Amino acid sequence: MQDYKRIKYYIISAGLLYVIFVWLNFTGRRLAGDDVSEKELRQGMSSHNRFYHK
Amino acid sequence: MKSVSNLLSNKVFCPECKQELQCYDRENSTYFACASCDIFFKRDEDGKATVLAEFKPYRETIVSLKLGSEGTLEGKNMRVVGIIQKLDPEEDISWFEYLLYNPAVENYLTLVEVRGHWTLVRRSQYQEYKVHNLDGEYRVRYKNRLFSFYTTYKYKILFAQGEFDWNIALHADKTETDEYICPPDILVHEIRKDLSGLQEDDGRIWYKGTYIEPKTIAEAFNVPISQFPSKRGLGALQPNPALENWTLVIRFTVAMLVLVFITQFLFAFYKPERTVWAQPLSFTPDTGSIATATFHKQVTNSFDIQGPANLDIELSVPVYNEWIEVPVTLVNDGNGDTYESSKAIEYYHGYQDGESWSEGSINETMVFNSIPSGKYHLNIEAYAEAKKNYSGYITVRQNAILYSNLILMLAALLAYPVYLIWKRNQTEEQRWT
């Protein structure tokens, strides 16, 4: 019975994951996140004040 | 179907306590164990009784199936005519054997209960099993299945009641039993020896058995399952619980894997990867500070993105034992929305103790997710350690295959089957320890 419940959860989870997978691919998103460090809705050019210190 | 309900039983009286005992197998039963005084005796054809042994009193013994109870197993009406409790003194494990009788069945069937696990055992019609030493393990090959050696033991009888067609007291202590298992089935090899310890002429007998759930027996004999002892540990023949629904899990997982790959293929077909911009880069120093040098900003021409899409921006700068940081800003020409990211490109190479080593790469990729449709351009800046000219190359692709999504999806799908395999192995280890 316990095993049957686990399988039920597995099937439901796999189904949900598949829906998320399709949505991510359709909208061009990565589940692991993107490389955009800032996403700003403002006019004009961006400014940087980052420096790389080795 | 021949029923045992209408069987007339002979009445037999215990020579010791005069208790009336039932005898259902009138043709064959000649040995009797009195449940009242624990005497084991033989009754001759002329009715003369000879006491053979006295078992230890086990008044507190609780049997799961009562002597004389009736049930239907494998479509046959059976009656419990004998009960034996045996003990393996070396392992200190005891078990019950319930002898089931139906005149239509050639030999007794035996229900064996050990630690709450049940096996239905019968004498095998095939007696020519051969034990092979395969890879250092004793195994029996039968019908394309390998039965592995499980245990060997001799037994003592702790308790008995009912009727028997053989001298159970004579064979106790002198019967060597080897068990070979291929769950849920078992082959049992009994080697009976006579009083002088020599093997009897017909003393090698093979039995075969199959694991049976207590629920099936409780239903067959119409007794509440609560009357049965609870299962303790994993039964030697118990089907691996981790694999109970293995076929269903595997079929579902394979179906999902196929679906995921088809989906990925369809996305690659309907939203194909394409290069939307590519150009050489030329970084010329602008100003210098103490720690870093900055470079003139480069602005690309506009290009179209058909979204929503991910953008895969690949930067390539052939640095050598140095680094350069390249901040990139994607700017929407229409509404001014910006998306910023930065990548450090660094590559180091050298020799140590005569061995060549390298670290980093001259290529880096950044991914912008879910970019809406529109015209865009890139602002590319740079900071570096050295104030010198750098050349490079930038490639912008849209709808690159998002392998991380695919890998995470596959990992999530395979996690449960992998867990089941691990659980199966753990359980099997438990079976053999």
Image (tube, coloured by chain):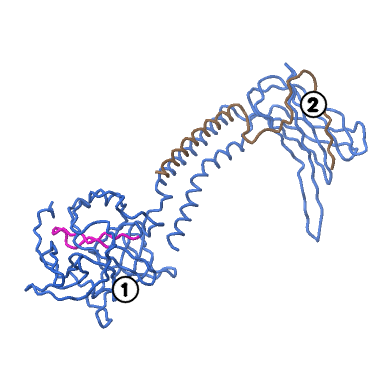
Q: Where is residue B57 drawn, in percent x and y?
A: 26, 68
Residue sitting nearer the eye, B126 or B278: B126
Local secondary structure at mark 1:
strand
Judge depth for marks 1 and 2 and give the one in front.
1
Chain coloured blue in the rendered structure: B
Point out the tag, 1 or 2, that comes first from the N-terminus: 1
Q: Disc 1 is attached to a residue of which chain?
A: B
Vertical order, B373 against B290 (above or below): above
Classify residue B295 as left or right of residue B8. Answer: right
Can residue B98 be found in the magenta stretch?
A: yes
Q: Amino acid at mark 1?
A: Glu
Q: Are marks 1 and 2 on the same chain?
A: yes
Q: Where is residue B322 drawn, in percent x and y?
A: 84, 44
Shade of chain A as shown in the rendered figure: brown
Can residue B39 be found in the magenta stretch?
A: no
Question: Where are the magenta residues, as a range?
Answer: B97-114
Q: Where is residue B362 drawn, in percent x and y?
A: 77, 42
The image quarter containing residue B151 is bottom left
Q: Amino acid at mark 2?
A: Asn
The image quarter containing residue B45 is bottom left
Q: Disc 2 is attached to a residue of which chain?
A: B
Q: Pointer 1: what residue?
A: B176
Residue at x 34% of width, y 57% of height? B117
Q: Where is residue B345 drawn, in percent x and y?
A: 78, 40
Classify residue B65 as left or right of residue A16. Answer: left
Q: Pointer 2: what residue?
A: B379
Task: State the residue lying farthest toward the bottom.
Answer: B196
Q: Quadrant of the C terminus of chain B?
A: bottom left
